[in-house]
Image (tube, rainbow, N blue to C red):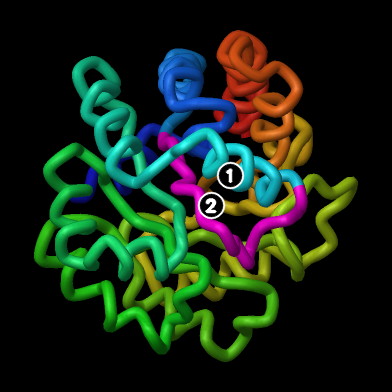
Amino acid sequence: MSKIAKAFEKGKAFIPFITCGDPDLETTERIVRAMAAAGADLIELGIPFSDPTAEGPVIQAANVRALAAGTTTDRIFDMVRRLRADVDTPMVFMTYANVVFSYDSERFISTCADIGIDGLILPDVPYEEKAEFAPLCRQYGLDLISMVAPTSESRIAMIAREATGFIYIVSSLGVTGVRSAITTDIGAIVRLVRENSKCPCAVGFGISQPEQARSMAALSDGAIVGSAIVKLAAQYGKDAAGPIGEYVKTMADAVHSA
């Protein structure tokens, strides 16, 4: 069983996201440790990219700040090596195909395996194009995480059948960002996923409040939160680890009680 699947074994999983290098990698490292200590079951690390098409303004701005601070893929790899000395929470990278291609796909994915990254999320790679990356991920023991959106409809069953690790259910149309309400019929998507896959599924995009996280986790196997955490990183800068740790504890407690 993959380490990612194990993150869901003890119940509902809380999955926080952070953009690496915003405001700097030393702060990111402290934030990741704080999130792990606060009960995160799996942590998504965003590798910044100049054109993050799935992201709303909050995470786009974080990408700009991280790149301006000199964040590179190699420096992020070094940070993960340091974290893996004492953090055993499963971790996945979320980034864009161009980042992987430009580094060299095999070199990128083999390095991920070497440093203890458990999976990869590439939001700009549709199911039909995943053959560019899936065989390399299998070769090196990484889970290539599949995403399904409300518009996936007829493709959901097909995507779910071949999924590994966990299935990322996108709760809303559009880009990432905090939303006051999630109106998609998540239950219907989850039912379709479960009919076609044993992979756990977690819901992301738009979740920011404990009650939202609890209700999404009750319908699925977990909740993913990004923009609300990245906002705290922007607000507190180098001092963000404490406030983010407190927020993650509140959210993780809500998810674990679902």
- The residue carrying mark 1 is 224
Query: Amino acid under label 2?
Result: Ala
Q: Does the residue at mark 2 contact the one at mark 1 (Cβ under 8 Å)?
A: yes
Q: Tag 1's secondary structure? A: strand
Q: Magenta stretch: residue 255 in it?
A: no
Left or right placement of residue 18 versus residue 140 in this view: right
Residue 129: x and y in percent read: 38, 85
Left or right placement of residue 152 versus residue 119 in this view: right
Q: Is residue 182 above or below residue 124?
A: above
Q: Residue at x 51, y 66 (%)?
A: 123
Left or right placement of residue 23 versus residue 183 in this view: left
Left or right placement of residue 85 versus residue 157 in this view: left
**Viewer-nearest residue: 150 or 187:** 150
Q: Residue at x 76, y 51 (%)?
A: 57
User: Taking the image as drawn, is residue 17 in sight?
Assistant: no
**Quadrant of the rendering where the C terminus is positioned:** top right
- N-term-proximal mark, 2 vs 1: 2
Alpha-carbon span between mark 2 and mark 1 = 7 Å
Query: Amino acid under label 1?
Result: Ile
Residue 151: x and y in percent read: 68, 81
- Residue 202's label in the rendered image is 2
Range of residues picked out in magenta: 42-57
Query: Label 2: few (<14), some or many (≥20) within 10 Å?
Result: many
**Viewer-nearest residue: 103 or 151:** 103
Residue 152: x and y in percent read: 61, 82
Q: Tag 2's secondary structure? A: strand
Q: How many marks?
A: 2
Q: Nearer the viewer, mark 2 or mark 1?
A: 1
Residue 215: x and y in percent read: 72, 43
